[in-house]
Image (cartoon, grey):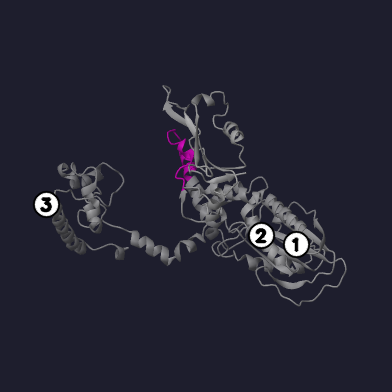
Amino acid sequence: LINFISSWKTEFVDSRKVWTEYLKRRIKKKEKKKTISIEDLEDLWNKGIPRINTLFQRDRNILAFDHGWRIRMELKKYQQLKNNPFWWTSSKHDGKLWDLSRYRIQVISQNGGVENILEHTLFKGTFFPSWEGLFWEKNSGFEESFNSKKLTNAQRSGLNQIPNRRFTLWWSPTINRGNVFIGFKVQLDLTGVFMHGKIPTLKISLIQIFRAHLWQKIHESICISFCKVLDTNSKSLYIQLVQKEQIHPRKSYKMNSSCADIVLFSKNKWEINPPSLMTAPEEKGCKILTEKGSIFWLDIQLRWGDFDSHDIERYSRGKFLDYSTDLASVYPSKKGMLIAFDLAYNIFGGYGYWIPSLKKIFCETCQKIMKVNPALYILRERIRKSLHLYVSETPETLMGFEDFKNIFKGKKVWLVDESCFYRVSIHRTSDGNLTAKPVNGCLIIFLPIKGTLVLRVIHASFWKQQKKTFSIIPVESCRRNIFNHFKTTKRRTPCGNSHFSKIIN
């Protein structure tokens, strides 16, 4: 740290220069009958003793009368049990005398940048597109409700475990791995998660995330998605029958043996490519399987990776070779493939024999499953909630040039802004409760073809007979009256507070 903090000698020399420069600039401004502003001192900011910043704080006029503050800071050690090592300085009088932003930048770069640091965490398990805009919720409502209550020491220590649990879960790919805890690994019940050591806080978090047989449901949902895709592409792949096997409920988290989830029966003879990774290019001129009624199987595997072992392609290859050669695993034929999904890092990989054109279809299917699978969505929401990790702003899809062109074409398209449709005034009652009272709002409609702007005032009395104050039903009923009058085919409604942003057919 000493390399990132200036010595006192340097500080005093710089301070003399900074305050001399400040006096010169102040005199020049005074001659022009102007007051000096922050913009005039940007290059001197965070410099000098005391810092130039102290001239622009709220208490700058009162601080001159605050005599003997350093002695009072020293005498505080007789009143407070907590030791204050910085008793000799004050942020109000001296400003912030050290800046560790350079140190922070250096530490991040030495650790390989933000992306490499996040690789050690459960960030990829949340499936956020970017780390920018994320923030931690400091205290949950559950914790805040206990702040004003009298608690026993046991209850208070229980509340302290909540941030510890979040920390352990966030860094779990780094903490819970074989290279850290060497010993017998234990598999969590009803999941494929392995604990490499006794970490009770992490165990509680993971059991809570995978409650209600979520691991099994994710496996079942992925299998169904693959069946639908294979049914759709049955003609191009010459598939006569797609058969989803009746598997044991524990198959998804049984890691010492396996069986086929989906079995394909061919119409004609398939050209089976030799075993390779899903991402490897397809090979041509391979051996032809001559038996009639060729059978091809598909095995779906789930895993919970950690920092040391989240190479999903290596994992899928190893599992395929293990399961296809051992006696415990049961497959209907020698030809098949294994696809693995890492739920902690949201990555996938596959290895095995390949039917022509199957690689491209499966790559696209796996990417789609990762994005839109409902069971995976539930898992990610639970992880985010356990971490108290949220996005500050919901990103909205921006309109492209083609969208603007389509708006002004011959078809009837409306741009609708309903951000002020429902407005309320909030006030506190005599009991101390907050009540919301509806006030007048408006619905704005713009017709691009005619250039007409329609403004419909929504009176406060419109909400009197509504049981649910703001639901889609009153909005749609009001819209329908206007739309029927103009008989439109398309209309645009906003996302959030944005104006004119989204088409509804």
x, y percent for residue 115: 48, 62
Chain-order first, disc 3 or disc 2: 3
Q: Earlier in the sequence, mark 1 or mark 3?
A: 3
Q: Nearer the viewer, mark 3 or mark 2?
A: 3
Question: Of tags 1 and 2, which is closer to the observer?
Answer: 2
Q: In this rendering, would 448 be left or right of 322?
A: left
Q: Which quarter of the rendered picture does the N terminus lie within? A: bottom left
The C terminus - image quarter:
top right
User: Residue 222 location in percent, x, y?
Assistant: 70, 54
Q: Secondary structure at mark 3?
A: helix
Which type of secondary structure does the marked residue at label 1 adopt?
A: strand
The mark nearer the N terminus, 1 or 2, is 1
In the image, which residues are magenta? 136-160
Question: Residue placed at 40% from the left, 63% from the top?
Answer: 107
**Amino acid type, callout 1:** Leu
Q: Quadrant of residue 251?
A: bottom right
Q: Which residue is mark 2?
A: 366
What separation in Å lies between label 3 and label 2 (alpha carbons)? 71 Å
| Label 1 neighbour load within 10 Å: few <14, some 14-19, many 20+ | many
Residue at the spot of label 1: 298
Residue 195 spot, x, y in % from top left? 60, 56
- The answer to if 468 sits in the magenta stretch is no
Disc 2 secondary structure class: helix
Which residue in the structure is indicated by mark 3? 31
Q: Is residue 223 left or right of residue 417?
A: right
Say what amino acid the circle numbered 3 marks. Glu
Would you call the spot at circle 3 few (<14 residues within 10 Å), some (14-19), or many (20 or more)?
A: few
- Looking at the rendered structure, the kind of residue marked 2 is Cys
* Vertical arrangement, residue 276 with respect to residue 222, above or below: below
